Amino acid sequence: MKRSHIIIVALVAVVAAILVSTYTSAVDSVSFATAQATPGKQVKVVGTFDKTKSIEYDAMANADLTTFYVIDSEGQSQQVKLFDKQGKPMGLEMSENVTLEGKFESDGTFHASHMLMKCPSKYNEQKHSLASDKQ
């Protein structure tokens, strides 16, 4: 086999591995109802932090566990147990959107392994201190 053939075969193998890795790690974005219908399947849920319910965090009992509620795109509020080595996420109460990656367990609780928050912009005109000076 020529050297160029070996290089081409190696490149095709690398591209195929990247494609397979990307496809298998892709997570579906669903509502809590859809996620609950398939317990154990890793999903992504996008919603907002439910400010009507409290956040439970006890660093002495389990510093990796934070329990709170999220309202999904269909308006369903669901208890979420976030397991994160960094502890309670800062700014959770002020977040606009929350994206959770996790799965429903057989006991009916949603266990999140990763969370991404979109916090309010510090440049929002309604809350910016310079906006009040213009009036």
Image (spheres, helix red, strand yellow):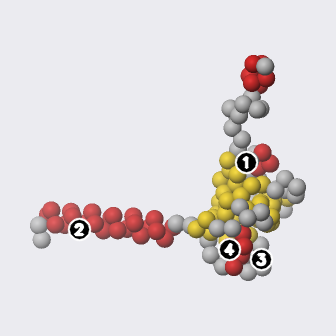
Residue 110 percent location from the top left of the image: 74, 70
Q: Which residue is mark 3?
A: 108
| Real-space Cα separation, disc 3 to disc 2, in angstroms | 47 Å
Earlier in the chain: of badge 3 and badge 1, it is: 1
Which residue sits at x=19%, y=66%? 6
Give, as a three-letter code, the residue at label 4: Thr
Question: Does any portion of residue 85 appear in the rendered image?
Answer: no
Q: Quadrant of the N terminus?
A: bottom left
Disc count in the image?
Answer: 4
| Picture layout, residue 86 above or below residue 126 | below
Task: Name the quadrant containing residue 42.
Answer: bottom right
Q: What is the spatial separation of the Cα atoms under label 4 and label 2, in whole angstroms?
A: 41 Å
The residue depicted at 71 percent of the width and 61 percent of the height is 73
Which residue matches tag 4?
34
**Mark 4 vs 2, N-terminal side:** 2
Mark 3 residue type: Gly
Q: Nearer the viewer, residue 109 or 77?
A: 77
Number of residues whose C-alpha sits closer than 10 Å to that of mark 4, classed few (under 14), some (14–19) or many (20 or more): few
Name the secondary structure under disc 4.
Answer: helix
Give me the C-alpha separation between circle 1 and circle 4: 23 Å
Residue to which mark 1 is pinned? 96
Check disc 2 and report the residue beneath it: 9
In which quadrant of the rendered image does the C terminus lie? top right
Tell whether label 2 touches label 1 (CB within 8 Å): no
